[in-house]
Amino acid sequence: MSAAVQGRAGGRRIRPFDWRHNPGFGFFTALIMLFLYVPLVVLVVFSFNANHFVTVWTGFSLHWFVRVAHNGDIRHAAYISVIVGVMATICSTMIAIAAALGFERGGSFRGETSAMGLVMMPLVVPEIVTAITTLIFFSSIGFHYGVLNLVIAHTVFCIPFAMLPIQARLRAIGTGYEDAARDLYGDEWRIFLRITLPLMVPGIMAGSILAFVTSLDDFLISFMVSSAGSTTLPVYVYGMMRLGVTPEVNAISAILLVISAALALVAFLISRPNEAGAAAGGTVAATTN
Amino acid sequence: MIKLRPVFWLLLPAVGVIFVFGAIPLLISLVYSFLTANPYGGVAMPPTFSSYVQMLFDQDFDGSLVFMPDYIWIAVRSLYLALLTTMLSLAVGFPVAWYIVCQSPNRRKVLLTLVSLPFWINTLIRTYCWILILRDEGLINGFLKWLGIIQHPLPLLYNQGAILLGLVYTFLPFMVLPIYATLERLDPRLIEAAYDLYANRWQLFRRVIWPLTKPGIAAGTVLVFAPALGAFLQPDLLGGGKQLLIGSLIEMQFTSSRNWPFGAALSMLVTFAVLVALAWQSRRSKAGAEARA
């Protein structure tokens, strides 16, 4: 690069060549980061507010967290959320492991693009459409089993989120180790158990955490599908929000926010951050092309 | 007998589950949209087009159909807000993605994590945060009052601007990440070649970077546009129910209005719009692939 510059310039000083240096872009990006994070910080800070008037700061207090912890309805909703989340995570991760192996190690086959498109469908269809079509589906076949309905609905939209990190991990490992084992006459099942599976573990862990977070965060689909007695935490919190801005809403929202953020961060740290980051959009871009 | 390859069995659970619980419900909803509403929820026979007629016409007292643009306005407003959200996200997201690509690998990781983290936080709670900031007794009004600039609170919440803000806030990561993914694969030598040919920054962006990033932009556009079109929480919480959008209208058909076929018909409309967007995207990314070659 520098040789080219000198050759052309002939000793004359010409404009700097570093295209990576863009004045103003750093400042702009910093502003956008503030835009993304200031509202979250505001919520967490005001959840520790002693005052009843929510956005007038009067002092530090854990009072509202104690109130939330003693609220039986919230505890029940949290229990439902965890049950649904854990079951949906287990189901979707198992399915996602198989699917990721199929897409990454199955070679190319007819209908690969359509299969990928179908698996990615929950990412593209607007949530409200998924919510009401699921509601109509369960109602049309007369399937009303409370928590089980929620587990099935959550499993469906958790599959892509669980699959993307696993798939990214498989792609990152490459087939070198497996080929070496095959050269050493390892049979397929043993290669999978002794080589592929252990190497997949970070991807599986990241995928299952992200599936759990996705399930825990879901509001609209649970809102439509859940029946009385199987209210998840976000649905319950939404009901509280409709009644007004209260310190309890702040406290429970802050708890949910911190749990989601912490779990997602753990998932990012286990897998490489750009793998997990790409899971949100980049891979979708690659697969829908 | 045809010998099935293992890949079939590996993909069967995922494809099967999403087909049965994702694709078939869409088809059943399509059927429902042609049935008669049952006032107690659910549907009844006979099949009819009334749900689709209802989008354009209202039944008068004497049973004659009168043209009623209310629902068209809701659809137009939803489309307008979704498009505006997409364009704003692109305008904001592109520079951010470009800045991240220009950083060292370690800083890239940190910045990418920061951009994608909000995606994993509950949308309900992220939307609620803005109520704390924008409402009459909220942070901005409180601050301005404290400064003595205003006497009465500014009406920041419960308008289209607040909905738009909430939508951009929620869906911005969907725009940044696909654009980043394409920019990362961009060959730096092309940029250097452009500089060697005396391109300035604007020409470089317009003639080299933008055309080569088109597939990422198209993917980001769809990923922002589709959920923004069907958004429910942002108009509900930040619009205060005053600015009815198609997402809230669909929700109402299953809660207060109890008109399932009409709700199903409206969802089919949204699904159709998303399919159009997807078709546009796949054409765009093909064009981009040709430009690359």
Image (cartoon, rainbow, N blue to C red):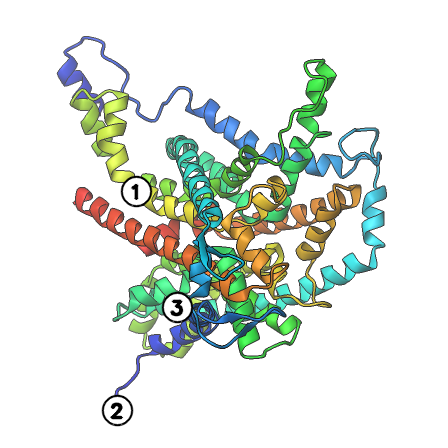
Q: Which residue is mark 1?
A: B185
Pick the front one: B95 or A102: B95
Question: In the image, is A78 to the left or to the right of B181?
Answer: right
Residue nearest the viewer, comparing B49 with B261: B49
- Residue B65, placed above or below residue B81: below
Chain of the residue under label 3: A
Between residues B194 and B248, which one lies in front from this camera angle? B248
- At x 52% / y 26%, what residue is drawn? A31
Report the Cα–Cα distance between label 2 and label 3.
Answer: 25 Å
Q: Chain of mark 1?
A: B
Mark 3 residue type: Leu
User: What mark, if any, has residue A103 been given in the picture?
Assistant: none
Q: For mark 2, what is the residue? A: B1
User: Is residue A186 among the parts visible in the rendering?
Assistant: no
Crowding at dot 2, Cα within 10 Å, few <14 / some 14-19 / many 20+, comes out as: few
Q: Determine the CA span between mark 1 and mark 2.
A: 44 Å
The image quadrant where one finds the N terminus of chain A is: top left
Single out the mark in the foreground, 1 or 2: 2
